[in-house]
Image (tube, rainbow, N blue to C red):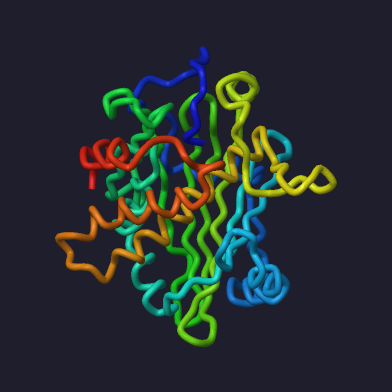
């Protein structure tokens, strides 16, 4: 979840590996996302339904974010139209290493290493910390299985799953769906979900009622004024989903630069993108962010 949490009795040791990668898909029914229809058919329906809202989005670009909380599951979802041709988007995001370069842009992600998992699968091993200014040596392992479920001329689907996470979180699921739009653009959906144990929820609520009491998400609360946004656990998941989506944007923005400059440019573009939404996403200054990221891998 990558927002500060107090220690709990169930906290795993830093970089501890728990569970078996072969069982990654077990128990994920609670965070299953609607994947019944073929990706292109389903995503085109979503695009048509959201087209007008995307065009008039208050976020300053064709971008919408939503969230839900039910049965200990939190889910945040971003829908966006991007100025990247689908063929380029598909080719880039079909590479596990590109995802490590994307995920490591998040404030609390200290490392991401792509490698072979069990049964021929691909594994993304992420080191995440409770707070952005914590050292990598204090990080916890979040071990994702990476699957390219579909990658064709008309649709892309990438699914990442992790059965257990730090501080009482579990059943992580990241899903990226994308299709081509006319004019060299693409429409994509980025969804991020996980579950919280009772202890983790109590810890998060304590944080949100004290140090995090002023933090909000992006969804406006109906009937409570123009400047009232969702808070609490839904605010947490919206901020997390948005930070990861903006990492995808930043990665593509830097992809045309010379290879030797891309990493530094990705970091700068990500920070600039998050600062467009300071009320929700501001945590530190550029110098501190860059100093921490220059120690990260890759």
Residue ID at (35%, 73%): 91
**In this picture, residue 34 sits left or right of residue 24:** right
Query: Is 225 or 43 nearer to us in this picture?
Result: 225
Query: Is 192 or 145 nearer to us in this picture?
Result: 192
Residue ID at (40%, 72%): 89
- Can residue 17 be seen here? The reply is no
Quarter occupied by residue 295: top left
Query: Is 247 or 148 nearer to us in this picture?
Result: 247
Quarter occupied by residue 16: top left
Q: Name the residue furthest front.
A: 226
- Residue 61: percent from left, percent from top: 55, 66
- Residue 152: percent from left, percent from top: 45, 78
- Residue 75: percent from left, percent from top: 63, 46
**In this picture, residue 252 sits left or right of residue 210:** left
Q: Name the residue furthest bottom.
A: 183
- Can residue 134 be seen here? The reply is yes
Residue 166 vs 280, above or below: the answer is above
Residue ID at (72%, 42%): 228
- Residue 87: percent from left, percent from top: 40, 79
């Amino acid at each position: 979840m990558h927002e500060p949490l107090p220690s709990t009795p169930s906290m795993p040791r830093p970089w501890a590996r728990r569970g078996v990668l072969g069982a990654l898909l077990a128990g994920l029914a609670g965070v299953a996302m609607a994947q019944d229809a073929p990706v292109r058919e389903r995503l085109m329906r979503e695009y048509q339904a959201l087209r007008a809202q995307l065009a008039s989005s208050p976020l300053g670009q064709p971008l919408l974010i939503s969230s839900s909380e039910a049965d200990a599951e939190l889910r945040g979802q971003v829908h966006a139209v991007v100025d990247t041709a689908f063929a380029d988007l598909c080719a880039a995001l079909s590479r596990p290493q590109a995802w490590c370069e994307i995920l490591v842009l998040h404030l609390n992600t200290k490392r991401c290493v792509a490698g072979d998992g069990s049964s021929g699968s691909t594994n993304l091993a992420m080191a995440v910390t409770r707070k952005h200014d914590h050292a990598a040596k204090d990080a916890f392992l979040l071990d994702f299985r990476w699957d390219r479920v579909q990658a064709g001329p008309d649709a892309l689907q990438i699914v990442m799953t992790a059965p257990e996470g730090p501080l009482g979180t579990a059943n992580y699921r990241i899903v990226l769906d994308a299709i081509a739009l006319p004019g060299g653009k693409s429409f994509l959906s980025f969804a991020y979900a996980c579950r919280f144990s009772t202890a983790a929820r109590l810890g998060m609520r304590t944080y949100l009622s004290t140090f995090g009491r002023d933090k909000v998400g992006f969804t406006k609360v109906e009937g409570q004024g123009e400047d009232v946004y969702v808070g609490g656990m839904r605010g947490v998941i919206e901020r997390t989903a948005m930070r990861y989506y903006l990492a995808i944007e930043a990665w593509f923005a830097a992809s045309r630069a010379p290879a030797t400059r891309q990493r530094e440019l990705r970091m700068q573009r990500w920070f600039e993108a998050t600062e467009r939404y300071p009320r929700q996403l501001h945590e530190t200054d550029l110098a501190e962010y860059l100093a921490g990221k220059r120690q990260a891998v890759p």
